[in-house]
Image (cartoon, rainbow, N blue to C red):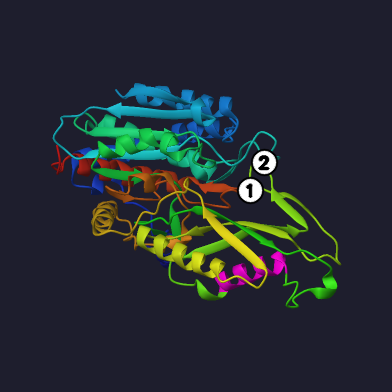
Amino acid sequence: MRLSAVVALAVLAVATPSFAAPKAAAISDAAERKMVATIDAERERNVQLLEALVRVNSGTMNLAGVERVGQMLRPEFEQLGFQVRWIPMAKVGRAGHLIATHKGDGKGKRILLIGHLDTVFEPDSPFQGWTRKGDIVEGPGVGDMKGGDVVIVSALRAMHAAGTLKRADITVVLTGDEEKPGEPLAVAREDLIAAGRASDVALDFEGLSQAGGKDVGSIARRSSTSWTIRARAKSGHSSGVCKPNAGCGAIYELARIVDAFRRELPEPNLTYNVGVILGGTEAGLNAEDTGGQASGKPNVIAGEAVARGDIRTLSPEQEARVRARMQAIVAAHLDKAEAEIEFSDDGYPPMAPTAGNRALLAKLNAVNATLGLPEMPAGDPANRGAGDISFVAFIDGLVGMGMAGEGSHAPGETADLTSLDRQAKRAALLITRLSREPRAKP
């Protein structure tokens, strides 16, 4: 062999991505080899499905578009032997959910696969369409999370081809309003919660987390609870502001509160945001709590002020503790002022990093070892938003089984097609192995 050829091979070896999987023949289990080979062979088919889904606008409030995406995915499950239902959600002002159920041998773990059909991009968004440049694709919801929906389909197709789907008990729930949930949430998520009660393990196919260019496992998600503060104070001429007879007014009262949040609330895994503030002689939020109106004059002490924000926590205990601290801060009023805080009852719950979730990540890393992929460390839950899997956090779960990408929720959102293949292989092998484990409950 010539020296130049040796150098070329060395350079190629160095340039090979660390997550490049081995050829299927290197895997000892015949069914697992078949699954990997099927996913490789069907790559363009999967990309074509992803493109077709992305080209249909399914902003949450585009109810017809959300249902259309559900109709496009329905036959993908039916041809694999799933029983598929469309659950209308008109009662909460949303399109509905797609639920697909596959009955196996009744012996292995029951596996719940979670995704969603909607995106944050409504029909009036200027960000529409599909663009592909090599392995990078751009489009509304391509990563969050139509890419994850395609990962589910690709993995199940591979299992079907390898004969491992036959014995697996699997429920797929694709909600139609994850980005803007209908209310009350108890109704909007009752079907998902029921599916969780009938399952042993949950896998969430939202986007894959990465850190330093490496894939990361996600065993936790934080909650999302909104809050509203309303402050009132004695109004009057500004010449008397902050004097004993007048007080400082409602805006100063509200400013005291939110600045105390900034200074006194910090702790690990907690964030607290102030999204909207209004204040003046009169101030009030609109019906959607997304803005409002305020009026006043520079020489009049503010009589009313209102703020809206959210908190995100990692456990119910942390949320209860933070709520109590916020209420105590609100209650320490300025003279001649008063305020109260109200927390929404329709927030997303947290998914704590349990021992069961860690054990599930270890099983995923055993799959990574089989595929010749690097081990995935547990990621920082503060880097993930709230999500549907938290409603079934009473069973073991993993988050981020979907595609890797950038710019989620913003124009220019992208996804990496190489991660589609990688994630589908991981999912197919993990679901197959879980389906062979005896279930712990009837």
In the rendered structure, does residue 137 fall within the stretch colored magenta?
no
Q: Are marks 1 and 2 in contact (CB under 8 Å)?
A: yes
Q: Looking at this view, is 37 or 158 the one in front? A: 158
Question: Which residue was labeled with disc 1?
Answer: 412
The residues bearing labels 1 and 2 have C-alpha atoms spaced at a distance of 7 Å
Q: Is residue 132 found left or right of 280 in the rendered image?
A: left
Callout 2: few (<14), some (14-19), or many (20+) C-alpha neighbours within 10 Å?
A: some
Question: Which residue was labeled with disc 2?
Answer: 127
Q: Is residue 122 found left or right of 5 in the rendered image?
A: right
x, y (%) of residue 8?
Answer: 44, 63
Vertical placement of residue 100 versus 423, above or below: above
Which structural element holds mark 2?
loop
Q: Quadrant of residue 124?
A: top right
Vertical placement of residue 26 versus 319, above or below: above
Instruction: Give me the residue at 57% from left, 24% from top.
Output: 64
Q: Is residue 41 visible?
A: no
Residue at the limit of the structure toward the bottom, as seen here: 243
